[in-house]
Image (spheres, grey):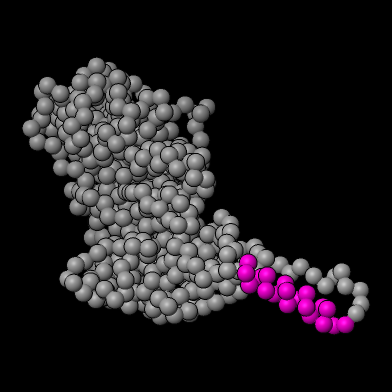
Amino acid sequence: MLELIRNFCIIAHIDHGKSTLADRIMQLTKSVDERVFHDQLLDSMDLERERGITIKSHPVSMSYTASDGKTYLLNLIDTPGHVDFTYEVSRSMAACESAVLLVDAAQGVQAQTVANTYLAVESNLEIIPVLNKIDLPSADVPSCKRQVEEALAIPMDNCGMVSSKTGAGVPELMEMIISRTPPPKSDHPEGPLRAIIFDSVYDVYRGVIAYIRIVDGVIRTGDYVRFMGTGMTTQVKEVGIFSPQMKPTASLSAGMVGYVIGTLKDPGDVRIGDTVTGRTEAAEEPLPGFREVRPMVFCGIYPVSTDEYEKVRTSLEKLQLNDAAFTYHPESSVALGFGFRCGFLGLLHMEIVQERLRREFNCDVISTHPAVVYRIHCRDGSEIEVDNPSRMPDPTRIEYIEEPLIKATIITPSEYIGDIMRIVMEHRGSVDKTDSLDGVRVILTCILPLNEILIDFNDTLKSVSRGYASMDYEYCGSRTSDIVRMDILLNGEAVDAFSCMVHRDRAVARGRQICAALKDAIPPHMFKIPVQAAIGRTIIAREDIRPFRKDVTAKLYGGDVTRKQKLLNKQKEGKKRMKQCGTVNVPQEAFVSVLRSNTEN
């Protein structure tokens, strides 16, 4: 049976045609009825179809009769292409023996093409290079082959040539996948059971559904299994494969990819990377799991209504089961009440999680400004990791602060090198190395502070390069930097939700942006409200929200001017007393406007 199984995934840069190729493969293998077929079939979320990107990995099992007359079971996993979802790709590779490396013949090798290739090499996968979109008038096949050979050291003498849109070359690619993908190996195909969980979802009626790859043994409906990491035991209620919807089967044997449903209802009972084994005939050693993911970006998520705190907590728990790269823990804010500090792999990852909370779980939430983790070295020799400005210790205790750095790989046409080097230096970065890719494009290796690329760096990069540059990045340590905490004061009171940690050189500009945004977002009160940005006790920016003014002299119809002056002075004294005890109401739109102000400037 193992000789007739092929497990493979499709990897590529974003928008190089992975999902479209998966559609053509499913049509060729007749895995889905033409009456229910639609484009991006494996992209099951509305967000994926709206944005045209893959967010979650999607497995599908297919039967295909090859030219040798044998019928093979093909397990395909379509993976995301954006850098923020690299962890999804690495987990999917654990269930495969080969990777179809898709390269757009019109765009050539991009940054994420390089990154995903390195991931596949680290996972010891057989790499099958394929050029896509060969039917486009702008396709340059010889140049793309040369780029792949020079940048990735992959021979292109026997590469695949397909058009995912028309289906041309897909039958030949299927034969190539079957011949070049090694069948799965198992040291103990008859048992004891060992299966790795590479993904999972939560169903309201059925509980936790684990996506598994069977390495050793067989799992059947009715068996009792144990999760070696958590120690939980459950009876298997259903096992099956994806075709592409969940299809129950009697059993799953070694080498197969499928799902298992037990009696577990708590999302915390199942962990990504855990090993499933039998309750009685248990394996001695668990399978090597996945590397621990390190969140890069943090922000606070708070329910708009305090009554929805438990609803948001439950939703985050279910979302974490489906997205192992997402982390959260409870926190509280004076301005926003009780909420959660959440960790993400990047800004797009943060946007997707917040949008999924609103759409899938109907949670109305507010998010604070995104931040990164700073390592603070205190004068007493201790070290503190801070991802929230409110947790920053007193400045007199701080010896120095280290900020995280990333190594960015930027691939761009050579005519845009000057502009890209300029924006890298504007974001406090440096260009370490420049390599020529094919005489027309170059690869820039840059070192940048992670905080500088959070909001607008990628947009600026696309703007100066007219959309031709692409970027991938990875964490590469930290360095000492002059980081300060900037507070925003409303009527003299600090609002912790607007506090942020910035480089001292950027503090004045950032403070002016936030003050100007709040001036427009907060409605007028009965008294003048000063909006100030401060570092410690030093005010670095200020805007004033003008008050409502009641015309107290309207009832006067004549007389001496001192009558009017007397009423105005009385109103002035009343406004002073109101300012001392008055409170400022901050609408939800103000928090959104602060985020938007950073994006636009």
Give the percent coordinates (x, y) of residue 365. 50, 48
State whether residue 66 is above or below residue 466: above
* Residue at image location 19% in from the left, 28% down from the top: 226
Query: 495 left or right of 546?
Result: left
- Examine the structure image and report whether residue 575 is included in the region drawn in magenta: yes
Q: Nearer the viewer, residue 591 or 437?
A: 591
Q: Which of 76 and 191 is in front in this view?
A: 191
Q: Nearer the viewer, residue 488 or 282?
A: 488
- Examine the structure image and report whether residue 223 is included in the region drawn in magenta: no
State whether residue 347 is above or below residue 214: below
Q: Which residue lies furthest to the right in this view?
A: 558
Query: 150 left or right of 585?
Result: left
How many badges with numbers are in the image?
0
Q: Which of 451 and 300 is in front in this view?
A: 300
* Residue at image location 65% in from the left, 64% down from the top: 525
State whether residue 486 is above or below residue 33: below
Give the percent coordinates (x, y) of residue 372. 35, 63
The answer to whether residue 345 is visible is yes
* Residue at image location 27% in from the left, 63% down from the top: 385
Give the percent coordinates (x, y) of residue 526. 67, 65
Magenta-tinted stretch: 560-578
Q: Residue furthest left?
A: 284
Query: 104 left or right of 577?
Result: left
SS majority, magenta: helix
* Residue at image location 24% in from the left, 56% down from the top: 118
State whether residue 97 is above or below residue 382: above
Q: Indicate the quadrant containing the N terminus: top left, top right, bottom left or bottom right.
A: top left
Give the percent coordinates (x, y) of residue 513. 53, 72
